Image: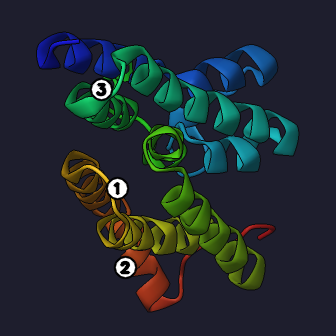
Amino acid sequence: MDLLPATLIGYTVGSLPIGYLVAQSARGVDLRRVGSGNVGATNVYRTTGLGIAIAVMLADMAKGAAVVLAAGGGESAVVAGAAAVVGHIYPVWLGFRGGKGVATASGVFGVLSPWPTAIAAAAFGVTVARTRYVSLGSIVATVLLPILEWSAPGPRADDLGATAVATLILFRHRGNLARLWSRTERAIGT
């Protein structure tokens, strides 16, 4: 697949606002107007419940994995995956206000780089379990993934893609970083 079609398909699929659509249809909740205003799984959890949040998280992961698989490998797969994360974060359908891209990125890199992604996911789980901060778990996993990616043998395109996506996700978490620093970040269950 050429890079332009990979980019367009990745962005289009990634921009499907699954969290928004599911919360709206299941509970009549407009995620943009409640909680954090984010359309990702954490806000879905806080506003509609754990079961729906898990479904949204898995669907967001699936859209990231699907575009990588559809692109067929190589640079096209990396570009399609990165575009899916951009689409999730900046969906045209919701005025470019989406989620933070963590679940979609985990689907992308779960296909491109399974072992580094599994280790980053484990770090996410341990961090959230110990601190109850999903944002901190997301930040830890996001920082760890490109480090692991560059340390493992494999295509440099995957390394570059992981670095670019991690940079974007960390940028989206800048408010969370400030709240974690000032100890005003909201923990799960509070």
| Location of residue 150 with respect to 44 vertically, above or below | below
Q: Write the residue at 26% across / 53% down.
A: 168
Report, in whole angstroms, how far the alpha carbon at label 1 lies from the one at label 3: 16 Å
Numbered tag placed on residue 169 in the rendering: 1
Numbered tag placed on residue 178 in the rendering: 2
Q: SS for tag 3?
A: helix
| Location of residue 124 with respect to 60 vertically, above or below | below
Q: Is residue 123 visible?
A: yes
| Closer to us: 99 or 164 | 164
> What x and y, as percent, mark residue 154?
32, 54
Q: Amino acid at mark 1?
A: Ile
Q: SS for tag 2?
A: helix
Q: SS for tag 1?
A: helix
The quadrant holding residue 94 is top left
Of the numbered discs 3 and 2, the one sitting upstream in the chain is: 3
Numbered tag placed on residue 80 in the rendering: 3
Q: The C terminus is located in which quarter?
A: bottom right
